[in-house]
Image (tube, rainbow, N blue to C red):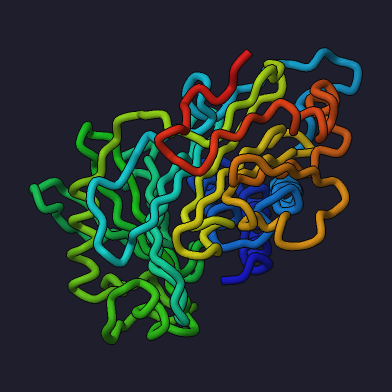
Amino acid sequence: MSTENDFSGLRSRLADLTEGPAPASPFDPVRTAAAGRRRVLARRTTAVGGTGTLAVAAVFGIVAAFAPGAPLPARPAAGIGADPLAKRVDFGWLPASLPNVSYISTAGGVGTEAVAEGNKTPDGAPRVDLMLLSDDGLSTLNGNERSIPVHLDDGRKAYWVTQSEGGGLMGDFQLRFPAKDGRWAEMAWSVNWGGVYSFTKISGAPGTVTVSPPGHAAPTSVPASAQWQQDLVHMATEVTDAPAQIPLPLRITGLPDGFKPETGFLWRPSMAGLGAPGTWSVLLIFDYSGPNPTSLEVGLHGTLSEKTAPVAKGTECATSGGLDVCVQGGSGSRGLAEVGGLKGLLKMVTLLGPDEKQWTTDVMVS
């Protein structure tokens, strides 16, 4: 699925939300927005820096939260404490086809996710998105979704959920289940309706799968092989949901309260999963809820998208100890201006090197 298609579908779904009757809209706004954010920010996209961030802000129609002359207010930061990247949910077991785990963290923990992904092949890469739900996974089902009961390995009741074309998230299939402490979670993946056989290869589950084509009701069976379903059920059984900080390869000194990362990513591989096996990248987004987001990205030397092409206007980069850091965007941001612009923000960053044993959870320091 292309980035443009992601944006187009998201615009359509958000338009449906605004135009539909209230409160009887067929969509749940929180879940729809979270799913849309997952598709735009977490699905494969090369625009993970400032350009992609600005595009997402435009899609959501986000406006400034303060007037031009008002004091810069404190904003909720992503993560836990001094660490802008934290996990509320994680995989406890993964099949060999999913060696890479990425994390996504947002202010307030809404939509916080872990992403398990395989290495690229000519057919793509296996991928499963994991997130916590705000309900039991069933109370928000709408007329375009169908639940199919299933049990986890230890007997906990769970449900496959399929989508019809009219559901706005057509092609998404999920497994919703109670995590070990009782909170409900969801694992999601997608089907390309134009290439079902390609899906079986990408999912890591070879074999013929029969699903309903576009325009029909939600499928009555799960579009994956029995082995892949068994693996997914075992993954769900072992999911953990204890909040924890995630060490990062940088320290940022002196950020004001009104300019803190509101969204954080740790990608494996780098570049939103598009990088070479064994690579990684950290992406922090400031002013995500404002009109001029700023991105800060760190990765192994030579692997960042900003460093593999001539540095664009509005981007500042530096290299230290085998790592690259690039800051981008933020034109007109009051928070960025307060720290001295992109160059000022770059000076606040200390890189800790590629040895993950040296990474820290004390990322933001006074």
Whole-percent x, y for residue 312 in the image: 84, 54
Image vertical order of residue 322 relative to residue 340, above or below: below
Quarter assignment of residue 191: bottom left
Number of callouts: 0
Quadrant of the image containing the N terminus: bottom right
Whole-percent x, y for residue 3 in the image: 64, 65
At x 54% / y 59%, what residue is drawn?
Answer: 43
Quadrant of the image containing the C terminus: top right
Viewer-proximal residue, 169 or 347?
Answer: 347
Asked if residue 322 shows in the view, the reply is yes
Asked if residue 163 shows in the view, the reply is no
At x 54% / y 29%, what residue is drawn?
Answer: 84
At x 37% / y 69%, what residue is drawn?
Answer: 218
- Residue at the far right: name it: 69
Whole-percent x, y for residue 197 in the image: 38, 85
- Residue at the far front: name it: 321
Quarter assignment of residue 330: top right
At x 50% / y 62%, what residue is drawn?
Answer: 169
Whole-percent x, y for residue 304 in the image: 64, 54
Viewer-proximal residue, 346 or 256?
Answer: 346
- Residue at the far left: name it: 154
